[in-house]
Amino acid sequence: MTAVVTETPEVSTMDRVRTFAARRASVLPTLAAIAILIVLLIGAQVEFGNFLTPRNLSALLLDHAYLLVLAVGMTFVIVTGGIDLSVGSVMAFTGILGAQMLASGIPVWIVVPVMLAGGAAIGTLIGVLVQYFNVQPFIASLAGLFLGRGLAYVVSLSSIRVENPPILWLQQTRFLIGEWYITPTGIIALVVVAAGAIVMAVTRFGRTVYAIGGSEQSARLMGLSVARTKVMVYVISGLCGGLAGLLLTAYSGAGYPRYGIGTELDVIACVVIGGTLLTGGRGYVLGSMVGVFVFATITTIISFMGAEQAWTHIIVGALLLLFIVVQRAIVARSDRQT
Amino acid sequence: MTDRGGAAGAHPRAAAPAAGAQMPGPMPCQDGPVSEAQALVQIAGATVRFGAFTALDGVDFRMFPGEVHSLMGENGAGKSTLIKALTGALALDEGTVVIGGSERRFGGPRDAQDAGVSTVYQEVDLLENLSVAENIFLGREPRRWGVIDHRTMRRDAAAVLSGLGLDVDPASPLGRYPLAVQQLVAIARAISTDVRVLVLDEPTSSLDLDEVAELFRVIRELKERGVAILFVSHFLDQVYEMSDRITVLRDGQLVGEYLTTELLRIDLVKKMLGRDVAEIAPREHVVEPEMPADPVLSARGLTRTPGIANADVDIAEGEVLGVAGLLGSGRTELARALTGVDRAHAGIIRIEGQPARLDSPRHAMNLGVVYSSENRRTEGLIGDLSIEDNIVLALQAQQGALHPISAPRRRELALSWIEALGIKPADPDRPVRTLSGGNQQKVMLARLLALSPRVIVLDEPTRGIDVGAKVEIQRLVGELADNGLSVVFISAELEEVLRVGDRVAILREGEVAETVAAASLNPDTLMALVAQPDLPEA
């Protein structure tokens, strides 16, 4: 999936096959997610006949651009062994804040940075609580969740329409490639995924994130900057929350303080389905993207069937359970080898 | 402290003024050749306190380039604390660390690494989820255009690994490889830096003989390169094979620094244990006791690697079997295997002649074998619960949640044990954490005794408690045995083992080397047995 698993030239073909399998052990859950995604897509095509259309697949990405951005931030946090429950309400807060500011006539080039900074600020708060006050990530980000939601209601209790042209441009512009199309929101989401994947794979910061997830104590003894990195992952997650707020506002054309209730759990589910270990140390940003697509495909299939959307959560819940069992099995196997 | 004469010229206190004299002036160039006479590491007056406890008390320590220096001492001697001070994992409360002529104040392990001090910890402290190459280079990865150059990193890692004679794939996750390989990868990490001081904390405890030989070859190479190596091991053979110089600590204080060639093995053990002996009693005085005819508990070939190998133990009814051995000889491992805490890899345990599979502590408890851990606080008592709760805890667990012990019965049980063992204060509602160490140990005992066991295994029951309480615990153990209970009594203090035990099992490197009648021993003869005097002296 990433540069970590590219082959070394000096080994022979036979060795390569063998070592490839060993090196890929941590990619297995992600491969499983890809397999499930393919099965879902083909199954849906067989069932409905008109599922695998460029239009439908484009919509799959664009309807879930905000989820994709949140999943990237969440991957950083979960790989360190933490959790961030605040992202749904951070997204709602920055969204409604942006909508309100735009409605009061504040120019867009101030509003967007403020939205991002608002998300990052809540992330910083959580990170500092976790690192310097030794608060459990679950509790610290739960506080962030309440804070974000509360602030959203403080800004406005009802929905605020956005009529600002640059914001609407993000969603309404369609770049066509044949029958495929993409909006600026989709491009932003994909750029965030690419940036996240690169940072995780080939920067010292990214490798430190993995090191902390492997063993925080070891990482510290190795002289890595554990404290700074741990705060940073929450800042990144908060920043992604702010950006998701912008994307959702553009997508829905409004800010609404009740957006994103329970979204943090969808995001965590996507990340876990994508192959990231909840205990930290293993996972890929690209895997999380696959997880989001699995989630999005299930949602779309259910709306194709005209069934109740509650089924989405039942199926996602079952998948989540399956993936956690698969991961436990893989971890147990690799533990036995040592 | 009277026997410094053995290495008079080599004692650090003798060298201290010279080091002090060169400190005030401008520092000499660090990169120039360091003469053999100049210490690379000079620690003076190192003191570390944890609350009221002084872990390190004014210790001087030095290392020369190109030497292997062993740091010796029993549990709690201050070895780890001194190592942590040298590797930046801990700050000194008092004292100075001078490396390469300049004084260092380490804010963390990173600072020490920058000063050329690399460490391989006892527990392999690497990251199993990352690749071998990353484990070697984490924090100083080769970069190109600002991003990590994985290709170069793997190539460099392969070079370092092949230098160590290690055939592993640098790109595979470290977790794939056995502990021994991980240990060598940790060493690869340490030596891939510009290392001047290499600290090896029990590097051989998880290695087999070939791997140890390989490690020693690497150590010798590094030594030739002028690296100062701090070698900590509880294997005396290895200490004598590898080290040029030995520093002994005891109870946080410096006992002395000696040339390995001038320090007899038996003298080293004496210095570690803090006993001074005029002469070693001849072997004939040691009486081999008769094995009990029908032991309550008997173990044959008990093995759990690493830890104990092929241990045979018999315990008769109403007998106290003392267990003596040096640190790392398998004392605790034996206790844990006998009581089902750790499952033995091989061997048979019989209880009253019947083969018994002790798969869990619970299982062992039901067969009447109970264990009191050396770590009272982490593996025994629950500090916030009351004395009463702690006492009835195991009994309630044994009976199951469906058969609750009634409140009056609990109170009655607690009061009777408080009285029988003289637990103070005699208040069943008092939280256990507020009790003194000795009384906590009695609560622990009461809990186990409430199960009416046949065999009780006590691991260091008197560690960290005051002298009065110690004597009381020893007396209690005697009384219990008089009442028919079989006791396995493990202690690092040899006098105590002799005072309490009827027979003494002597552990050496995981084996029960011999079992002797306690009455035929005095602490000196026992120490001689513990220290393997029959091996050739260095």
Image (spheres, rainbow, N blue to C red):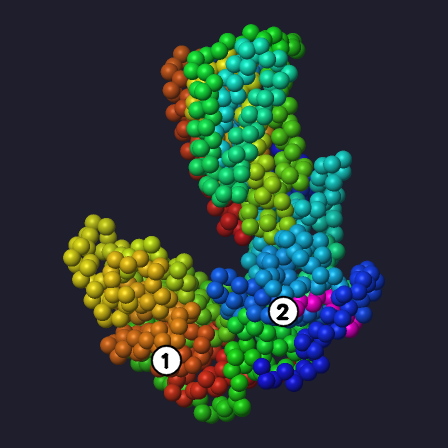
For the point 66% across and 68% down, the residue is: B44
Residue B496 visible to an observer of this rendering: yes
Q: Say which residue label 2 marks.
A: B45
Mark 2 nearby-residue class (10 Å; few <14, some 14–19, many ≥20): some
Question: In this view of the protein, which residue sits in the foreground, A56 or B281?
Answer: B281
Q: Which residues are magenta?
A: B36-45
Q: Secondary structure at mark 1?
A: loop
For the point 76% across and 65% down, the residue is: B24
Residue B398 visible to an observer of this rendering: no
Q: Amino acid at mark 2?
A: Gly
Chain letter behind tag 1: B
Q: Say which residue label 1 marks.
A: B501
For the point 70% across and 66% down, the residue is: B41
- Locate residue A292, reporting x and y percent: 52, 25
User: In the picture, residue B25 is in which quadrant?
Assistant: bottom right
- Locate residue A7, reporting x and y percent: 69, 39
Q: Amino acid at mark 1?
A: Gly
- Locate residue B465, reporting x and y percent: 40, 70
The verdict on a common chain for dots 1 and 2 is yes
For the point 22% across and 62% down, the residue is: B414
Indicate which label's residue lies in the foreground, 1 or 2.
2
Disc 1 versus disc 2: distance between alpha carbons? Answer: 40 Å
Does label 1 or label 2 sit earlier along the sequence?
2
Q: Secondary structure at mark 2?
A: strand
Q: Does residue B134 sit above or below A288 in this rendering?
A: below
* Horizontal relation, residue A243 to residue B36: left or right: left
